[in-house]
């Protein structure tokens, strides 16, 4: 049966990377007029079983990226750990690639992100960038801020990897030395966080833009474990979060989903980090908003009208399922009223994000219900004490 | 990667038939701890691209059904046009088959359905069953009711096929003669319909039961074109609809989804028809209820706790996309706020159900938005004048 005899003609959209973000794009692509092609690195990738087409290739190989781009009408990404020069060349050669290499660079290089955005007035914590490890520079930064610096690798980290938050100056120093052997070192003043907020902004290749309401996120060891709507903070603070996110979208020029993570302190809102793709802090939108971040990401890169971002319920909570020593009981999770279980189809491994649960409802019992389901599934993450 | 290393261990559920109902079961199966295996009759079947496993086989062949049942932990159905004797034998041989042949018989044989339910006090229109065509019996029924009878084949019809509603006694007679060559003939008194209502009831193999709120349906030429929640009728009438549906679930012993279609007249509620599977009148539950009819059908046949049936929005409308002379413009449909487009992946053919659109919202603009999207997609069905 020819595709063009179906209800809808099909645009071919390519996704570089086969993780759970590509998988959830594939789920949302089912009812959009597009064919979702995924280039992953392993036949067991999370997205392999759900993509319309799945092929193997390396995101670091210019050859593989060029071949893949030639098979699709437009290209997007499951993750930013790609060959930016090759991506840049694809755009130069007339391929439709969203986000562009210029936008991806913000997500790939944390030092570049921090420096560039700060220079444009979008402030994060006080910071310093060390090209390589230098005892004097490290000590000066620690002395000026009077705190043990947070140490980050410029690139290569995710979910808390490549980042050290410690009370020990010696530990921070040793970590910075190690990071410095392969990357620039980003030192940041630790922020006294009252709350963490994330904002998902979606910008179409045509320039149309929508945003989801700010949500409250909770991180443990640098990994997101819980996301709740509404954020439950002062409307003026949430409004500032939304304004900062919109400005970051302008500055980074990100087509598709942009996730902006922010720290709320007792006096201020400061930028934490930026991701130029669908993000864990937006998974709640699958059931919790009229259009999910994944569907809107695909609409944006395809150049179609963006969908309504209004929440479907008064309260929505998403809780990640992180691998523990062994899996739990999915049937017990199914018994939790309103629990939507998302299984990424990944092999069980302690510390790994394996799925998530979302609960929507009329009151804040959604939080405890989402946790009960995630706990039944055997998550290693713990509720707020 | 072995399935049992994933977040959830996998029950193997088999679906006989590869149409859009099996496809939507496959979509909802993604995040349940099961592997969905579909036995279809054509590689181009709607469910083929979404099922975890897809095989070819005939629903009429005892051999194919037995082979398929041996590969799964439990068996269910996309449609009821199956070899009932073979299905009965599978249950007898210890396979878990839901619904059973005894339940399916109600959906397969309209004369049996009408006779059996009427005998138990669940009344539809006045009716007569003719074993074969007989001019005298036909004339007596027409004379007693003083109306041109609605003529139905006992079995083999769907979406208005095998049914004639006519103002011409001669046309009805000729149709009945033709039907009588291959089937019992069911004659029914035409009902003066004020409204049509459908109720979806779900019963687990463990006996747990839930129901969705009654919805208003609109049929054109026997095919469902529009379904809306809330039904907008007197609560006492809706309560009676729910009670009748619950009683039909008891009597038919249907495990899984049972759809009960009812006629509301100026004085009464009478049974129209019964389907022992997920049904067009329940497609709105995918976005419109906390748990969809497809997920609850799978939970029911698997013996897991049933999910919450509460609507997610104050107003939900689903409109079918029926093939017209040629396809419409999917991009125009994407521009309709809140329109969720479902494309069954079937080849375009005038008169065929190709997909549907659902819109959820806070007011009754959901009806016009759903229609706008369906019209943009090129549906041949028309709105209520």
Image: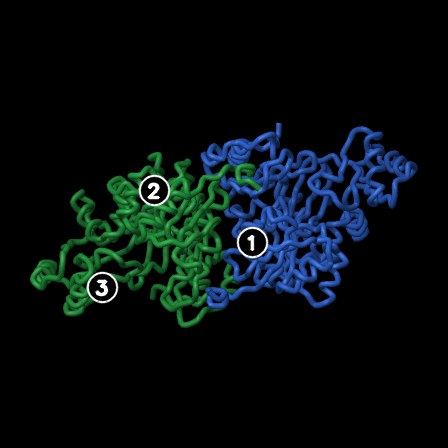
Chain colours: A blue, B green
Name the chain under label 1.
A
Q: From the viewer's perspective, tell me whether residue A326 is left or right of residue B59.
A: right
Location of residue A343 (image quadrant): top right
- Proximity of marks 2 and 3: CB atoms separated by less than 8 Å: no
Q: Nearer the viewer, residue B68 or A206?
A: B68
* Mark 2 → mark 1, Cα distance in angstroms: 31 Å
Tell me whether marks 2 and 1 sit on the same chain: no
Q: Position of residue A30 (x, y in %)?
A: 51, 56
Of circles 2 and 3, the one toward us is 2
Q: Is residue A72 above or below residue A350?
A: below
* Mark 2 → mark 3, Cα distance in angstroms: 33 Å
Q: Position of residue B352 (x, y in %)?
A: 37, 64
The circle drawn on residue B97 is: 2
**Which residue carries the number 3 mark?**
B164
Q: Position of residue B290 (x, y in %)?
A: 45, 43
Of circles 2 and 1, the one toward us is 2
Q: Could you tell me if residue A266 is visible in this image?
A: yes
The circle drawn on residue A111 is: none
């Amino acid at each position: 049966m020819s595709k063009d005899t179906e209800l809808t003609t099909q645009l071919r959209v390519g996704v570089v990377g086969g993780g759970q973000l590509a998988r959830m794009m594939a789920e949302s692509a089912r009812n959009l007029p597009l064919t979702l092609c995924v280039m992953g690195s392993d036949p067991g990738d999370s997205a392999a079983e759900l993509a319309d087409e799945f092929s193997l290739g390396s995101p670091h190989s210019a050859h593989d990226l060029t071949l893949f781009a030639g098979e699709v009408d437009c290209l997007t990404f499951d993750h930013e750990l790609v060959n930016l020069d090759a991506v840049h060349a694809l755009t130069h050669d007339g391929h439709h690639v969203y986000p562009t290499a210029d936008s991806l660079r913000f997500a790939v290089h944390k030092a570049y992100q921090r420096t560039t955005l700060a220079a444009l007035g979008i402030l994060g914590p006080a910071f310093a960038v060390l090209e390589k490890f230098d005892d004097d520079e490290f000590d000066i930064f620690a002395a000026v801020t009077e705190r043990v610096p947070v140490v980050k690798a410029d690139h290569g980290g995710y979910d808390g990897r490549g980042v050290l938050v410690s009370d020990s100056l010696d530990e921070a120093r040793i970590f910075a030395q190690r990071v410095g052997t392969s990357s620039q070192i980003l030192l940041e003043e630790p922020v006294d966080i009252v709350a963490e907020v994330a904002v998902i902004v979606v910008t179409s290749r045509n320039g149309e833009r929508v945003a989801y309401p700010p949500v409250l996120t909770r991180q443990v060891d640098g990994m997101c474990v819980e996301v709740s709507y509404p954020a439950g903070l002062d409307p003026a603070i949430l409004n500032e979060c939304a304004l900062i996110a919109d400005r970051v979208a302008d500055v980074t020029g990100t087509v598709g989903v942009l996730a902006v993570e922010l720290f709320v302190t007792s006096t201020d809102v400061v930028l934490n980090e930026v991701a130029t793709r669908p993000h864990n802090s937006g998974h709640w939108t699958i059931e919790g908003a009229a259009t999910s971040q994944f569907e809107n990401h695909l609409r944006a890169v395809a150049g179609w009208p963006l969908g309504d971002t209004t929440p479907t319920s008064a309260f929505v909570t998403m809780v990640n399922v992180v691998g523990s020593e062994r899996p739990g009981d999915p049937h017990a999770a199914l018994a939790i009223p309103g629990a939507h279980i998302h299984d990424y189809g990944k092999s069980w491994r302690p510390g790994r994000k394996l799925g998530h649960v979302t609960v929507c409802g009329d009151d804040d019992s959604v939080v405890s219900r989402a946790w009960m389901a995630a706990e039944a599934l055997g998550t290693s993450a713990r509720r707020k004490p």
